[in-house]
Amino acid sequence: MSIFGGRFRGGVHPPEMKETASSEIVRFEAPEKLYIHLFQGFGSPSNPIVKKGDRVLKGSVIAEPSSKFSAFLHSPVSGIVEGIVKWPHSSGKMLDAVAISNDFENKSEIRGEARIHDQLTSRAITEIIRNSGIVGLGGAAFPTDIKLSPPVGKKIDFLIVNGCECEPYLTSDDRLMIERTDEIAEGAKIAARVLSAPNIVFAVEDNKREAIAELKKKEDSRISVSILPTRYPQGGEKQLIFAVLKRKVPAGGLPADVGCVVINVQTAFSIYRSVVYGVPLYERVVTLGGFFRKPGNILAPIGTTVGDIINARGGIPDDVDKIVLGGVMMGVSVSDLRIPVAKGTSGILLLKTEKKKEFNCIRCLRCSDVCPMNLTPRLAYYLYKKGDVYDGAKNCIECGSCAYICPARIPLVHYLKWAKAK
């Protein structure tokens, strides 16, 4: 049964710019060189287990977790390890990466036959997911095996599969829901079995009509589709849980505190591939948006550089002056084409910046009206000017709604990030 969900507090509705929603996913052929960073964006860097000169196969483990909040890394190609090198990272730093030279033989250690998984224990499934290096593919890159292992005593009655994809330009999740509905639904069932969750809800914004139609075919006594108003940041965990179930996650709390776990649709798809076919997470769907000469959605090997992808799709138009990894609201602007696709890279956007003059705050409090966390972002700006810190920033999800709506064009999220770091 479909659930017509409600609204969360605040948020904005920027232009959607989802022209690539009709672009089918195509496989991007792995380039000659790949660079897989040991730090994929969350937790601690993985420990490399390969060295210069080692031969690897497609799917070979090249790095192991260094802590609970770390993940296995796998080679997307067969080839030779050129070494552990310092390589440009989206953080702006030079970080360790495993450099692999592709031999284009595509030899794999993945068995390929479907595994009979119905008899596997929850613990065995969780182990497969961890060994496959699966992390949250909505951008957070949080290890999925941890998310599927809630604290003792926390009963989970709802698994919410996040298909909102509320960021402008991005359509990779939308296309995956349309093209791989069966696999996503099966991956969700596997995750729900691990959690002993009796209910699965696919949460989708109402601008994704084709995806909704496909998901509705999967509805039964256990699976439902929640159709939500298109609103950013609908995909935030706390906002999504409130919109779907009217449950409020406490400040500093986790979704498990209100009986929920949220996973992204690409994560569900990866769970299916790993548990059923033994395919680790070495590639992901990425939207190529903005002013790409050839925009679309690609299945890209982790470690493929931004430059290789842009060059293969026609190069950078002359008037493009900004490259963003992720979405325009929460993504990261980069200036080095050697930066590779990571597990959390949902999009690559080529944009033309509009220079805007910043004015003094006029105290209109529009930033407070749209803040989904009920904060007062202007205080971060005001206190920064006084050399002080806004304590409320610790609850900021860095969605950027405040900066988007600010008539004075103040980059409020920058001040919130600074205060949060302090």
Image (spheres, grey):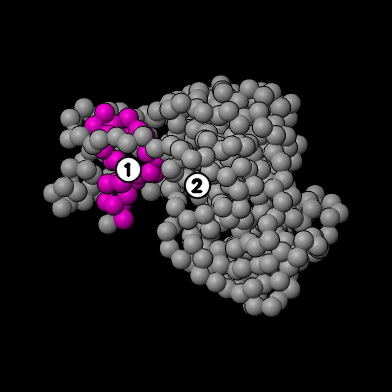
Please tell me in which quadrant of the rendered image residue 413 appears.
top left
Upstream in sequence: badge 2 or badge 1: 2
Tell me the chief SS of the magenta region: helix
Looking at the rendered image, the quarter that the C terminus falls into is bottom left
Is residue 196 magenta-colored? no
Residue sitting at x 16%, y 47%: 385
In the image, taking residue 186 as reference, residue 89 lies left or right, namely: left
Examine the rendering and report whether any part of residue 40 can be seen: yes
Mark 2 burial class by Cα count in 10 Å: few <14, some 14-19, many 20+: many
Q: Count neighbours of disc 1 (C-alpha within 10 A) and say few if under 14, some if 14 to 19, many if 20 or more.
A: many
Q: State yes or no: residue 406 in magenta.
A: yes
The spot of residue 246 in percent (x, y) is 47, 30
The quadrant holding residue 180 is top right
Residue 72 in the image, given as x and y percentages of width and height: 62, 64
Given residues 408 and 183, the one toward you in this image is 408
Which residue is disc 2 drawn over? Answer: 325
Q: Secondary structure at mark 1?
A: helix
Do tag 2 and tag 1 residues touch (Cβ < 8 Å)? Answer: no
**Which residue type does callout 2 highlight?**
Leu
- Span highlighted in magenta in the image: 393-421
Work out which residue is located at the far left of the displayed protein and give it. Answer: 386
Q: Which residue is mark 1?
A: 413
In the drawing, what numbered circle is on residue 32? none
Q: Is residue 300 left or right of residue 371?
A: right
Residue closest to the eye, 286 or 185:
286
